[in-house]
Image (tube, rainbow, N blue to C red):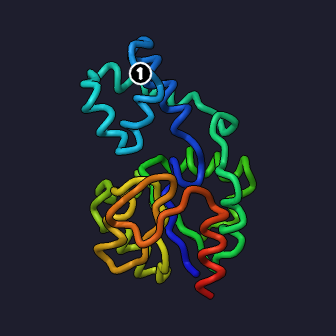
Amino acid sequence: MNILWDFDGTLFDTYPAYSKIFSQVLEGKVDEKEIYKRLKVSFSHAIDYYKLTKSQIDEIGILESKLTPNDVKPFEKVEEILKFANKNVIMTHKDRHGVLSILKHYGWDKYFSDMVTIDDGFPRKPNSLSYQYLHEKHKIDLAIGDREIDLIPAKELGISTCIFQNKSKFADYEISDYSDLTKLIKSAM
């Protein structure tokens, strides 16, 4: 099975760190749980919702660049799926350096045969061009993400979809943790 993964909120639990950053930029005036909900739609949605200024967006970028791999943790049992898959690829809006530093920190770089990052110049999700590129190159069987914008491009290309810790009308499968996906994949074999 060849799997396309989203990064933030799918492989790694990055939203708590991002919620703290947003809260700091918003001077603690917004609850982190509320920020988390907005980030789960998309980063740009949260920026628009809170009507952040250019300087606030820049400040978020500076604070985000100071995050270390220890500030983000992988989700439990996801490594079992990575080991099981024939191929794993990533499509993310993060920069390549940031992704690689986190993957290397956890020893997970060996599990991924390819990735598309913001550095590659593809349009942002839900545009399907990056997914099409990865699908043509790797014959993707399943796309996993935590937001609808992670699934829409896969659906357009006829790839099966799985939503993690969320709900979506675009999901063929919904899982709350990766032990659910392990069972699902093994039953499909």
Q: Furthest residue to the bottom? A: 189
* Residue 61, above or below 75: above
**Label 1: element kind:** helix
Residue at 28% across, 23% down: 52
Q: On screen, 116 above or below 97?
A: below
**In x, y percent, where is residue 147?**
40, 53
Q: In the rendered image, which residue does mark 1 sit on?
A: 59
Q: Is residue 107 visible?
A: yes
Residue shown at 51%/57% (left/top)?
A: 164
- Residue 149 on image: x %, y %: 34, 56
Question: On the rendered structure, is 85 left or right of 23?
Answer: right
Q: Could you tell me residue 33's position as x and y percent?
A: 47, 29
Q: Count the marks: how many?
A: 1
| Left or right of 61 on screen, residue 12 | right
Q: Is residue 21 above or below residue 37?
A: above
Residue in the foreground of this view, choosing between 172 and 85? 172
The quadrant the C terminus occupies is bottom right
- 53 sits to left or right of 187: left
Q: Note whether 5 is above or below 58 in the view shown.
A: below
Place residue 28 in its image quadrant. Answer: top left
Residue closest to the far right = 107
Q: Considering the image in quadrants, where does the N terminus appear?
A: bottom right
Residue drawn at 56 percent across, 56 percent down: 176
Q: Residue at x 25, y 32 (%)?
A: 48
Q: Could one spot residue 115 in this view of the protein?
A: no
What is the x, y in percent for residue 141?
Answer: 49, 80
- Graded by Cα atoms within 10 Å as few (under 14), some (14 to 19) or many (20 or more), the crowding at tag 1 reads some
Q: Amino acid at mark 1?
A: Glu
